[in-house]
Amino acid sequence: MFTLKVMPRFTETDALGHINNTELPVWFEQARTPIFKFFTPSLDVNKWQLILAKIEVEFIAEIFYGSEVEIKTFIERVGNSSIQILHEVIQDNKLVAKGKATTVHFDHQKKKSKPISGNIKALLNEHLSS
Amino acid sequence: MFTLKVMPRFTETDALGHINNTELPVWFEQARTPIFKFFTPSLDVNKWQLILAKIEVEFIAEIFYGSEVEIKTFIERVGNSSIQILHEVIQDNKLVAKGKATTVHFDHQKKKSKPISGNIKALLNEHLSS
Amino acid sequence: MFTLKVMPRFTETDALGHINNTELPVWFEQARTPIFKFFTPSLDVNKWQLILAKIEVEFIAEIFYGSEVEIKTFIERVGNSSIQILHEVIQDNKLVAKGKATTVHFDHQKKKSKPISGNIKALLNEHLSS
Amino acid sequence: MFTLKVMPRFTETDALGHINNTELPVWFEQARTPIFKFFTPSLDVNKWQLILAKIEVEFIAEIFYGSEVEIKTFIERVGNSSIQILHEVIQDNKLVAKGKATTVHFDHQKKKSKPISGNIKALLNEHLSS
């Protein structure tokens, strides 16, 4: 599991007085940073190795400004070239949202997927959801 | 079907040179405006009737800056208090992304869902997919 | 003068019930697209010629969701390598915000400014604020 | 002085490979949180006391993904009902951007400014730029 703490930003609220739905994919992308680092330890954007295939977000309860949010990120499954990821968002001890992401090891020059090395698979497998 | 044309914004690109994944939920929210109007014709945020329960985005091909995007939005299913919505994103005659959203007719004071009226169901059913 | 019409997005509202301040620079960037095209007619991001040196935004009145916004953009001054730009935001026949931007003709490989050609200066000068 | 550390988000980059200009006002808003707390200690958005009158951002050097950013915020001047604020952005020991903001103590019901109390002025004055 990876953990990211996020302080919601005022601009992330909307006129309903809570955090807007579109911010969850932003937080989840940031929560996947440790996974990005497995592929590009320097985080150099010119050496990027991943592409996103699919995301899902389930909104369980309102998320509010003024209180820190914790995002727990798990690896659900490691495939030949893809990774399925789970996110959970907790605010004030309450599960407020869940997410999924499928990311693919990708050659941005050749524009095609490529296998994940055994070394990186081993790193990912240390973070499997139980 | 509802149609929205969006000109991608420069700030919506990312360091990979294409539109970042997090912009699709933003565009899809905007593409649901005609549905918002069925419930709140004035779009007055103080009379808002909907809440979002779930979103999904499937990324099919890169989306680029400099070329208009068309978003087609369909009603997939109208339930007692919820609506399932489909989105398709076309750029340069190519399907580049698809999305789903589940939105719920919601009483923001009582914090609970409420049935969709027959009148609004009829309006929604005019936009069913297939 | 260049004109851009923008329909505010729900996610651009904040908990105060109006459009958040951080959206104005986003709209202004989009309003400068015709200027971008003078330098990069294809809008190909790999051939980008400009960099932003400074922005200012003055918030005059609240901007609301549900009503279209018009952004008028003027060239204030064309220098050797820089351009000073003015923006005005009108909603419901009311001036609600003003902005300024200084953009610089820039060689992204050499990381230094370069003179604006006479041809482009002539195009820009057609849009001078009176 | 107030200090905020921000880890740039991948979505905050743009196709030029650096952080897009529109993110600076977002970070600066977040950097003003301690000032928001002087007026609304709970950060309850329903008790908000401030409105933004003006912002300026000066872009000094490129800001990159993958390296933490430090934002230093100073009070420049406290007026009867307004506050002038300075921001400095440092990345890798380099000043990369500066900003200004003018915020106004505001009655969101009556839609007019109101004087800042002596107590809050004293708190603000502890953070004056030298």
Image: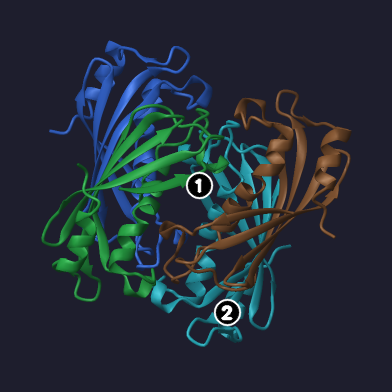
Chain colours: A brown, B cyan, C blue, D green
Query: In the rendered image, which quarter is residue A10 located in?
Result: bottom left
Mark 2 or mark 1, which has the lower sequence index?
1
Q: Residue A67 location in percent, x, y?
A: 49, 66
Q: Which residue is drawn at 61% across and 61% down?
A: A70
| Left or right side of D60 for A35 | right
In the picture of the structure, the residue carrying the numbered disc 2 is B105
Q: Nearer the viewer, residue D7 or D101?
A: D7
At mark 2, the secondary structure is strand
What is the crowding at mark 1: few (fewer than 14 residues within 10 Å), some, or many (at least 20)? some
Whether residue B101 can be seen here: no
Q: In this view, does C5 lie above or below D68?
A: below
Q: Residue at x 50, y 70 (%)?
A: B36
Whether residue A101 can be seen here: yes
Identify residue type, mark 2.
Answer: His
- Badge 2 and badge 1 in a common chain: yes
Q: Residue at x 54, y 75 (%)?
A: B50
